[in-house]
Amino acid sequence: MGCAAGWLGADGGHLPWSDTWGSASSRATRMTSSEAMDTLGQYKITVWEEENFQGKRCEFLMECPSIMERGFRKIRSIKVESGPWVGFEYPEYQGQQFILEKGDYPRWEAWSGNSGYRTEHLLSFRPVKCAVSYWDTTEGGVRAGRASSRQPSMEAMRDRLKDDLHGAWDGGVRYTQRYNHNDSKVILYEAENFQGHKFELSDDYPSLQAMGWGNKEVASIKVNAGAWVAYQYPGYRGYQYVLERDRQNGEFKKYNEYSSQAHTNQIQSIRRVQH
Amino acid sequence: MGCAAGWLGADGGHLPWSDTWGSASSRATRMTSSEAMDTLGQYKITVWEEENFQGKRCEFLMECPSIMERGFRKIRSIKVESGPWVGFEYPEYQGQQFILEKGDYPRWEAWSGNSGYRTEHLLSFRPVKCAVSYWDTTEGGVRAGRASSRQPSMEAMRDRLKDDLHGAWDGGVRYTQRYNHNDSKVILYEAENFQGHKFELSDDYPSLQAMGWGNKEVASIKVNAGAWVAYQYPGYRGYQYVLERDRQNGEFKKYNEYSSQAHTNQIQSIRRVQH
């Protein structure tokens, strides 16, 4: 099946995808799921079969459970126009995870941080849940944060986003305390099933040990708000685990719930997902 | 020259290093430079010639301009007990840079994020400047931040660090707003020599484009406080540039001042160095 403008039905939902970017309104009238409505305009990713944005390409506005069903043999470069997304090694969101925030990824090393073996597969991907921005002007200025419970309408968000980004360029120097870090919270536990010593975080930590965590393992994790990426090594390297409040209710009782591929509970750095 | 306990004179200073960790006081009495005094107890790194902390090993408390002068052919695993450090591809702090924060690095992929070519060299390293913690109890509780001008004595810092880390474990859940992010500041510029549009940051950004930066290049950078790592790709991947307030007065006028190896001004993510 090739990559062409249109909507495709698939297991569990409707998948909008196209090889060109058309008008949002014409698409919107063809959407059938509320999830698609929420996603439209927020998420856009383009993938290429070759490095440096060469070869066969396809744009997606929603999740893709198998790039091979779109006639791709592989993905070698990616541009994220609006995200974040999470890529997976295998179809159906299995295997290693790769966080994909807005930007250009001209070759696989730009997203893969694994070290156990060098996988070059990225065969499925989907938007990250729980990393939705909202804009709150009640506290004396535009403030951006991450929350799932008090979002304005999509239209209001888009308008504010547009204003906000223009503001960023018009004002010269601007202090970018735009994200409200208190909105993302995660608790790390020393033992499985949320037992043992625990530590609640609301900020990024490239070294959990430098922060005071006693060892290089984390046995269970509870995400109270937002979306996080935990990494095997310090400095955001090695295996990646994308942990979302809206997946498994944010509760990851054992390391093998971090991802379908996790075979160690080694976690040495953690950070919030940017949106 | 092998790795054995003692001090070695070297160009530009004295290099304390040993193959075992003795008492700090016995070392302190043998120090001859004020830089060494400042560093003692703050920085400790152990390197191994083989992966997974095997083979020849050596501990360092201060910079190492060439690991080959210590009888090593290569470095394949690293433990940072206290940092941060920055590793370099070549001797004398040349070539690609690798940020090394506290934690375990069992193989080179744990620190190397390059993608242009897969270097496995890490032949010199030194402590990161300007990423020194201080503890400020004047604002109703222990607060940790990054500053170079208002540090307490090393003894006071060590005592407070010890208390602080114990506190972290004794208190169960604890909100870790320990680092004062306002203490790290960097300005990105669209054009060389600090010209064009600019953006001042005091927080981590895994995607500069998601934050509002208009393109994937940064032409010049001014570090006003702290130490930062800029990365070629989003999500802290690709080439790394460690940018310190105390190196070149924090002023990086062109991309080739980011590092001796930089051959592109592509920067898509940036974060503070943790200490």
Image: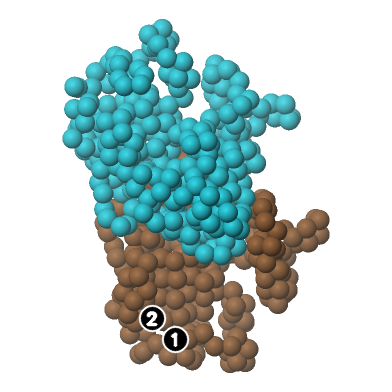
Chain colours: A brown, B cyan
Counting labels gives 2
The residue lying at 51 percent from left, 85 percent from top is: A21
Picture coordinates of residue A258 (x, y %)? 44, 57
Question: Please, which chain is the residue tagged with disc 2 on?
Answer: A
Left or right, A73 with reference to A269: left
The answer to which quarter of the image holds residue B35 is top left
Q: Are marks 2 and 1 in contact (CB under 8 Å)?
A: yes
Where disc 2 sits, the SS reads strand
The residue lying at 43 percent from left, 46 percent from top is: B258
Residue A183 lies, with reference to residue B9, above or below; the image says below
For marks 2 and 1, give the CA distance.
7 Å
Left or right, B129 with reference to A169: left
The residue lying at 44 percent from left, 86 percent from top is: A19
Residue A42 lies, with reference to residue B209, above or below; the image says below
Which image quarter is the N terminus of chain B in? top left
- Which residue is tagged 2? A57
Where disc 1 sits, the SS reads loop
Three-letter code, disc 1:
Asp
Picture coordinates of residue B187 (x, y %)? 59, 48
Front-most of B176 and B84?
B84
Q: Is residue B206 visible?
A: no
Left or right, B100 with reference to B197: left
Three-letter code, disc 2:
Arg
Label 2: few (<14), some or many (≥20) within 10 Å? Answer: some
Looking at the image, tell me whether mark 2 or mark 1 is earlier in sequence order: 1
Picture coordinates of residue A180 (x, y %)? 67, 54
Label 1: few (<14), some or many (≥20) within 10 Å? Answer: some
- Which residue is tagged 1? A19
Front-most of B12 and A29?
B12
